[in-house]
Amino acid sequence: MGFLSVLSMAHKLVKERVSPGDTVIDATCGNGVDTLFLAELVGPRGTVYAFDIQEEALERTRQRLNDSAAGAALHLVHASHADMVEQISADGRGKAAAAMFNLGYLPGADQSVITTPDGTLAALKAALAVLRPSGIVTVVLYPGHPGGAEEADAALQWASSLPQSLAQTVLYRMAQKAEAPYLLAIEKR
Ligand SMILES: C[S@@+](CC[C@H](N)C(=O)[O-])C[C@H]1O[C@@H](n2cnc3c(N)ncnc32)[C@H](O)[C@@H]1O
């Protein structure tokens, strides 16, 4: 039967914690797969913020959501996820139910445009700040591509050092393949 993929496990953890009408964040919208998933979860009364530094990714996401009937309020933000706090309306801060990160580069585009350890750490801290209690951050990490292992290590080190009074963190990872993508999930207390 096999285990869930890291992407499916991220969706499962998010789905268990998000309800219609919630505010949610896709920190790396790329092709918009996670954005659409989030929009369908929160429905027409919900709000989705989707970040990417590439206009092409925002356009792909816009297209994917236009083709759907999800109906959520969609804010496509052409900015780094590190600026998440400033980009989310004041009344949305501290209320988000989930923030999803899928790190790395946009498939089929310039592979030098990639998430970085410094930007990712800043964004993870910002995501925790905008989450409500019991909200979740999911991070799909790619140790197999250039720079990916350093980024994954930085994220893991940061998450491991979070006080348990602030958040609980878990890993979902293939034990036999060190370079396979893996999932870090952080639930805010
Ligand atoms: C692996 S793709 C995301 C895939 C996407 N979640 C999907 O469902 O198709 C990673 C994305 O992160 C974006 N990215 C890189 N640095 C970023 C940053 N600082 N802030 C926001 N997005 C960034 C890239 O442009 C790329 O589109």
Image (cartoon, rainbow, N blue to C red):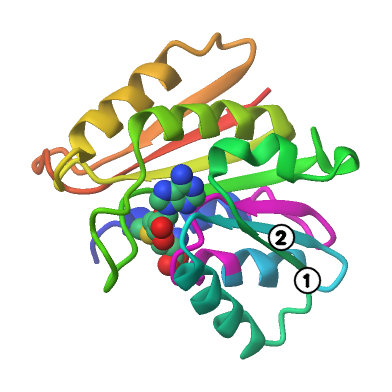
* Residue 3 located left or right of residue 63: left
Three-letter amino acid code at disc 1? Ala
- Depicted 73 relative to depicted 22: above or below: below
Q: Which residue is mark 2?
A: 48
Q: Position of residue 154 (x, y in %)?
A: 32, 23
Q: Position of residue 117 (x, y in %)?
A: 34, 30
In the rendered structure, find residue 72 and report the number of the disc placed on it.
1
Quadrant showing the C terminus: top right
Question: Which of the four quarters of the rendered structure image does ligand 1 lie in?
Answer: bottom left
* Residue 92 located left or right of residue 172: right
Quadrant showing the N terminus: bottom left
Relative depth, front residue between 3 and 157: 157
Three-letter amino acid code at disc 2? Val
Residue 52 visible in the snapshot:
yes
In the rendered structure, find residue 154 and report the number of the disc placed on it.
none
Give the extent of the magenta segment.
Answer: 16-35
Question: What SS does tag 2 mark?
Answer: strand
